[in-house]
Image (spheres, grey):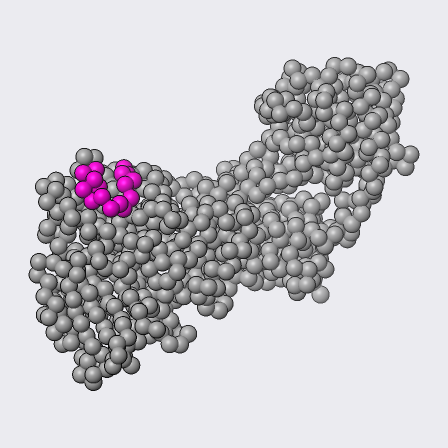
Amino acid sequence: MSVHHHYWQGSFVGDEEAGRRLAELPAAVEAALAAELETETVLAACDALSAALCDADHPVHGRLAAHLPEGEDPAVLAELGTLLGRRELTRKLRRELGGTAPGRLNRADPRETVYEAWAPVGLVAHIAPGNAATVAPLSIVEGLLAGNVNILKTSSADTLLTQHLMAELAALDPSGALAARIVVLRFPSSRQEWLRLMCAPADAVAVWGGEGAVEGVAAHVPAGCRLVEWGHRISFAYLTTDAWSDAVVLGALADDVCLHEQQACSSPQVVYLDTEDEGEVFAFAERFAAVLGARPPAVGVASAAEPDPAEAAELTTTELVARLEEHLGLTRVFAAPDGSWRVMADTRSPLTASPLHRSVWVKPLPRKRMIATLRPMRRYLQTAGIAGSPTDIAELSRTALAAGATRVTPVGAMLESYAGEPHDGVYALQRYSRRVAVQADPSLFATTACLDDLARPVVLPPPEGPLLGKEDVQEPARRLARADAELYFRSGGSTGAPALSVFSYDDYDSQMHAAARGLLAAGYDPVGDRTANLFYCGAMYGSFISFFSVLERLGGVQLPLSAGPDHRATAQALIDHGADTLFGMPSYLWQLLHAEADALRAYGGLRKVFYGGEHFTAEQQRTLRDTFGIEVIRSITYGSTDLGPLGYQCAESTGGVHHLHADLHTMEILDLAEDRPVAPGETGRLVFTTHARRGQHLGRYVIGDLGREVPGRCPCGRHAPRFELRGRTGDVMRVATYFLNHRRFLDLAGENGGHRGELQVRLDAADARERLTVRVERTGATDPERLREVFLAGYPELRSAVAERLLDLVVEAVDGASLDRSPTSGKLLAVVDTRR
């Protein structure tokens, strides 16, 4: 019976089936590439696998531990888990491809209709090494992050760790998109026909190994296919005079040598001293030999295995030749009696490869000769571990890089790495990607920030877990790791006590870019508009800062005025600097425009208003157009302090209708009383799951707003779902046994009563019955009695409560400045409930 040691697009197969499928590989690749793979799908699955690998009691950890190479410490799974976590992979994406959704065709410059993205090359064939258990799966993950289909060859001597690891990863993606992009085969390199079939349809071939391995694969790489060589490299340490006499430096150098038994490309094979004195070289070698000899043998790792016969022969030959040259005064050898380590001092500077297994050359190399000596070996150089003063390190780093080294580290950290670090002088994700561009007609795409919005819907992993309220999010935010808690905001407090929200700068940057794309869709022109940022600022309130950041990313002209009490000074600044676009809260903008109506009407330069945090009623918008000549009035964004931007308006959006920022969030609309979806078109509680937040789980967050789905595709052509805001749960009042809604009062006042100002509901407990006072901003046409009649005629529940003598209804006209507002944001409090 055939052993099923090949993993092919979701299932384990034997040799015969794998051979049949290899012959049909081109068709399988085309089918897989026809379906989109969202980067978030890869990140979510990898993060879930990461959590399992870091938990020694998790069933997945146990299943995979059984496939580790003999002698490999199970701790390697936790190390792999750390590398697969969202934190590490998002940092890698940002460093290498510029963002966490590199495949989306966004504007390269917001002021131009040119769209760029990183696209997959197509099929990447990976030829994995046999000496590193984690290299193969990580190579596939890199291919997946770039969106490719991946076929990987492991050695016939390898275990099935990579196959089962990839199977576990694919099982964590319910869409099946990952499984469709993964093939792992296990066969010997002598099976040339299979190697040829792997490489023939490939768009990139990644080879891990020495020159022989690369040459063997290169013969099968077709013309035009990208050959990515991850070959063997040589690394060295370089010590200045002060450093080589420091016992701490010697200990750190010994650690670099012993870790992984010099099997890593970044392990030092040569130690260079900044000297021409042969005596200093011999003296240092003797002292370092004592330090190296005190290091215990490695245990618990596969690399600690005894050298194979070929390696043992090389060790013996290298040491023997070095001992023979002692008679010529060229060398001196210090070695363990049992052959477990050796330090070979050599008076000649040219780079010499070590036979590894704790074998180190010590050579002189004055810094003035570094480039001339090392540059001939530039193709093979990798890490230079440098020890010296800060000035020495700065100077020598530049010299080492000029000589051909691709990375410089402190001595003692040569084998350490960081997320997104270039490998052998290049970014892996860029080698597995193509930079693509679309140039579009500005007259057709002026408000299109992302071309993909018009091409296809974004499909993110479905939301899971329990519903979360504000407190469920607030308490974990206070305990966030320092690396994830870099930016603190507080909410405006319009619906309760101000709440704390915490962001990493990376998350904040992603959200500001999303808000910027939404603003373009709403009709903002970063080339022509001159914008006054009139949001409130201070007390950790985020609106002013956020829209400052948005305009910065758009490259728009900005007057960062903020909302201030001196309306005359603000209006004068608008006039003096030619502002034509206003950002701000409706209540503040309304006050400013009416306080300085004569000056601003005479100016006549205002054309656009983008508002947030509240809504302008239809009557208020009519006033802005008729009185002030404003042409565009749209929501600047719909969002919250906790979640960031959630929705945006397009040129076809009116009222409270918004598109979902579908690349950041998924949305559910749940029944008001039960945790179940509402029927299509019904109003319910808006529930959001954020997928791109580091260190925080913001899944199924009940934000406190009400809304309904808007069916069908928007006339603007975008695929992003639409929803209409219908107020807040706090705006629904339980009064005199009835549920009354603030928005209903607002709509009736505007549509039937002709009211164009602000409106606030106040609830008080009177002696005999409750009192509901509708406070409306006094305008020239305000008639409280007429509005009371409108409310009673148009709101049956209110009329019944009054008729049954359960409620007193009062309508009063007041100055706008006397309405209750949030002290932080200036936002109007829709409902003020004084009942106890």
Q: Of residues 490 and 253, which is closer to you in this image? A: 490
Residue at position x 18%, y 42% in the image: 568
Residue at position x 31%, y 48% in the image: 536
Q: Position of residue 106 (x, y in %)?
A: 36, 45
The stretch drawn in magenta includes residue 564: yes
Residue furthest right in the image: 337
Look at the image and tell me whether residue 120 can be seen.
Answer: no
Residue at position x 33%, y 60% in the image: 494
The stretch drawn in magenta includes residue 601: no
Q: Left or right? Give the position of 130 relative to 207.
A: right
Residue at position x 63%, y 45% in the image: 127
The N terminus sits in image quarter: bottom right
Question: For the magenta stretch, what is the residue range?
Answer: 557-574
Look at the image and tell me whether residue 259 can be seen.
Answer: yes
The C terminus sits in image quarter: bottom left
Q: Of residues 643 and 66, which is closer to you in this image? A: 643
